[in-house]
């Protein structure tokens, strides 16, 4: 009739199997890649990588834009028909402004790095979501395990009480109380099983059908430099891209020049021979001061916003890391205290069971002691998982992937 508690060693071993609901469980890292592959934002970022590659290629070209060919023909055959004919072909070549080509190349490169950094930050963000989902599932699995233990103990107690009622050692009211305890334990188990299924479905939804892998506690990784954190890297590259946009706005204060090469073949009338000629034309648009100022102002505003966001992310990450370290320390200390409380609860329960067997305690007193012992055991299991979750959060705050 004794209550089956898990020792600290068995409790830690249990964590490795809390989420093993299938023999086909995959590591969390593999689940992360599957979840990332179905993220719309990740798909959009991959498409932007192709876009940025094309922009870098265009910025590295000799021309500022695609050349244009114009062809013309003129004749008097629909008027006085004296035999006048003229053919003309012109090839327009858009040219770079001074400094524009280098500025656009640098901007395209910076924007490509922004996309790569955002992908890394998105991967870390999704890892945090999966870590929470995994340990939510582990918590629900541990709760079901405790509910199974409680139900088994309640059924064992009910059978023992029924035997003692049959021989006249206990009153029938005690049997009714034991039966009520069994029904309560069975209802609690059903509730825990429903919660576990909900947590399993949530993880599966995030990972395109992947079952939750084994919830193995993470080792606390060596802290990365704050400057290496993917979210701060992303913010830093956004600042670099905004600076590149300012350089482009500075270089491009007017439309670019255009060099045209044209050829002409013509005659004045039917008796004249044809004459051929070649020519060059250079077009230099004037600067539009209001438009240039507007472009400069927009680029500077974007740079200011990027710098402000970088500072905000830096402060936020520093605070999150400090909180994660404190939470991990607190969780470890609380686990030690709960292990001591569990030992005391076991000793008290053993004495209560012996006293009940000798008729010195009532069944109600035993049930109260047993309930308190179960509560202590549940708190210990929850704290074991809380410590593992705190380690995952600490790694997450330092930008470490699972």
Image (cartoon, rainbow, N blue to C red):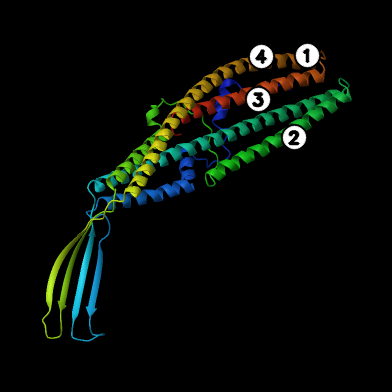
Q: Which residue bears the numbered disc 3?
A: 378
Q: Quarter of the image holding residue 317?
A: top left
Q: Which of marks 1 and 2 is in front?
A: 2
In percent of the image, x 73 and y 13: which residue is there?
351
Sequence order check, earlier mark of 1 and 4: 4
**Vertical relation: 294 (above or below) 217:** below
What residue does disc 2 label? 187
Give the x, y percent position of residue 115: 38, 44
From mark 4 to mark 2, how far is it between C-alphas? 28 Å
| Helix, strand or loop for disc 1 | helix
Q: Quadrant of residue 380?
A: top right
Percent coordinates x, y for residue 176 in the rendering:
85, 28
Inter-mark Cα distance, 1 to 2 = 29 Å
Q: Residue at x 41, y 25 (%)?
A: 223
Q: Residue 95 carries which label?
A: none
Instruction: Decide if residue 111 is on the left or right side of residue 92.
Output: right
Mark nearer the N terminus (3 vs 4)? 4
Residues at marks 2 and 3, CA–CA distance in whole angstroms = 17 Å
Closest to the camera, between mark 1 and mark 3, is: 3
Q: Mark 1 and mark 4: span between their CA atoms?
A: 17 Å
**Residue 131 appearing in the image:** yes
Kindly identify which residue carries mark 1.
Answer: 355
Could you say where residue 124 lies in the image, as x and y percent from the top left?
45, 36
Whether label 1 touches label 3, CB < 8 Å: no
**Pointer 1 or 2: first along the chain:** 2
Residue 356 lies left or right of residue 31; in this view the side is right
């Amino acid at each position: 009739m004794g209550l089956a508690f898990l020792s600290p060693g068995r409790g830690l071993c249990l964590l490795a199997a809390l989420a093993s609901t299938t023999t086909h469980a995959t590591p969390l890292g593999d689940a992360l890649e599957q979840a990332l592959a179905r993220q719309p934002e990740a798909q959009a970022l991959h498409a932007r990588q192709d876009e940025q590659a094309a922009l870098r290629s265009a910025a590295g070209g000799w021309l500022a834009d695609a050349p244009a060919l114009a062809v013309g023909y003129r004749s008097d055959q629909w008027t006085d028909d004296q035999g006048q004919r003229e053919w003309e072909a012109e090839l327009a070549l858009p040219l770079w402004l001074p400094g524009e080509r280098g500025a656009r190349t640098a901007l395209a490169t910076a924007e490509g790095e922004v996309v790569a950094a955002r992908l890394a930050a998105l991967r870390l963000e999704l890892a945090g979501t999966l870590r929470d989902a995994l340990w939510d599932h582990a918590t629900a699995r541990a709760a079901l395990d405790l509910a199974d233990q409680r139900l088994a103990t309640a059924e064992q107690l009910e059978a023992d009480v029924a035997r003692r009622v049959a021989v006249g050692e206990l009153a029938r009211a005690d049997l009714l109380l034991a039966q009520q305890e069994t029904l309560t334990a069975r209802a609690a188990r059903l509730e825990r099983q429903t919660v576990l299924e909900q947590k399993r479905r949530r993880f599966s939804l995030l990972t395109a059908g992947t079952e939750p892998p084994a919830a193995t506690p993470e080792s606390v990784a060596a802290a990365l430099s704050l400057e290496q954190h993917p979210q701060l890297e992303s913010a830093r590259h956004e600042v670099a891209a905004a600076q590149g946009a300012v350089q482009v706005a500075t270089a491009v204060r007017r439309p670019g020049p255009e060099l045209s090469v044209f050829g002409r073949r013509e005659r004045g009338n039917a008796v004249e021979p044809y004459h051929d000629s070649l020519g060059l034309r250079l077009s230099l648009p004037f600067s539009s001061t209001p438009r240039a100022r507007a472009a400069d102002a927009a680029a500077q505003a974007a740079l200011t916003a990027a710098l402000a966001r970088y500072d905000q992310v830096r402060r936020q990450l520093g605070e999150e890391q400090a909180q994660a370290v404190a939470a991990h320390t607190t969780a470890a200390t609380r686990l030690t205290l709960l292990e001591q409380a569990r030992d005391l609860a076991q000793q008290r329960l053993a004495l209560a069971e012996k006293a009940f067997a000798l008729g010195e305690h009532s069944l109600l007193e035993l049930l109260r002691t047993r309930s308190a012992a179960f509560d202590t055991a549940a708190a210990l299991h929850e704290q074991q998982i809380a410590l593992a979750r705190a380690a995952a959060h600490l790694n997450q705050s330092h930008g470490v992937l699972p």
